[in-house]
Image (spheres, rainbow, N blue to C red):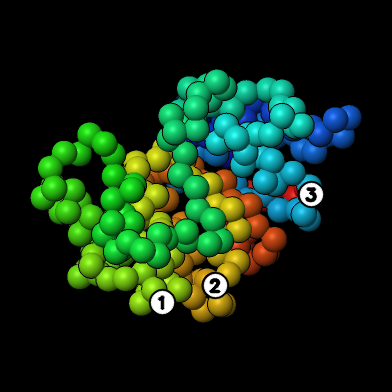
Amino acid sequence: MADGAAQMTGLRFEQVVLSLGEVRLMALDCTIGPGEVLTVMGPSGSGKSTLLAAITGTLEPAFAMTGRIRLDGRDLAGLPTEARQIGLLFQDEYLFPHLSVAANLAFGLKPGLKGRAARRARIEAALAEVGLAGFADRDPATLSGGQRARVALQRMLLSEPRALLLDEAFSKLDTGLRAQVRELVFETARHRALPVLQVTHDHSDAEAAGGETVCL
């Protein structure tokens, strides 16, 4: 993990402690630098999802957090979820079944990108980037598992996040496809200098990430 002056970039946990009542779930004090991956592993109920909620600003009232979470030096406390610039990938792609691939991706576009042609061009470029050129008008139901995962990745990246959270993101993929999609996600994060926090039950995910691992 980065330290010193580099702590102004990346995702920083400053003496963060998460608790449920009198029970302390976890404590973190580290920085995930740009392009780095921190993997958090632990059984159900150990606080992994609670940590993601604390980062995204969706922590339930029953839980308490002390310390600070900063992204590129900015304290996330008090910011609404949509202002935190955090990208999140789940084990399910959550593509809208009644919309085309292009319409699904459009949900990730920044509001500032105006004009139908400009938005369409950005969507087509995003698809081409992951080997899905010509898929814009496809029905999501016709896509393979790996194709759906790539569409979900690009939809998230179109929102221009400054950090990426992986919530068991590869758990529903079979072994071969899991390795392929995982490599794509980690390589994309490195290329875009995005700090990544990965929550997983699978040791192979941690090994593929190549960064530090915290076991709860």
Taking the view exactly as shown, the residue that stands out farthest to the right is 22
Where 146 sits versus 166, above or below? below
Q: Which mark is residue 211?
A: none
How far separated are the C-alphas under marks 2 and 3? 23 Å
- Would you name the residue on which mark 1 appears? 144
Circle 3 is placed at which residue position?
A: 45
Q: Position of residue 63 (x, y in %)?
A: 75, 32
- The reply, left or right, for residue 104 in relation to residue 40 is left
Q: Cα distance, mark 1 to mark 2?
A: 11 Å
At a point 46% along the width and 44% down the height, the residue shown is 87
Element at badge 3? loop
Dot 3: few (<14), some (14–19), or many (≥20) neighbours within 10 Å?
few
The residue carrying mark 2 is 173
State the residue at coordinates (23%, 67%): 137
Which amino acid, by three-letter code, is at mark 2? Leu
Q: Earlier in the sequence, mark 2 or mark 3?
A: 3
- Which residue is found at the position 78% from the left and 55% from the top? 43
Mark 2 and mark 1 in contact (Cβ < 8 Å)? no
Q: Is residue 201 above or below residue 111?
A: below
| Residue 105 screen position, x and y as percent | 31, 54
Secondary structure under badge 2? loop
For marks 3 and 1 on the same chain, the one whose residue lies earlier in the sequence: 3
Q: What's the CA distance linking mark 3 and mark 1? A: 32 Å
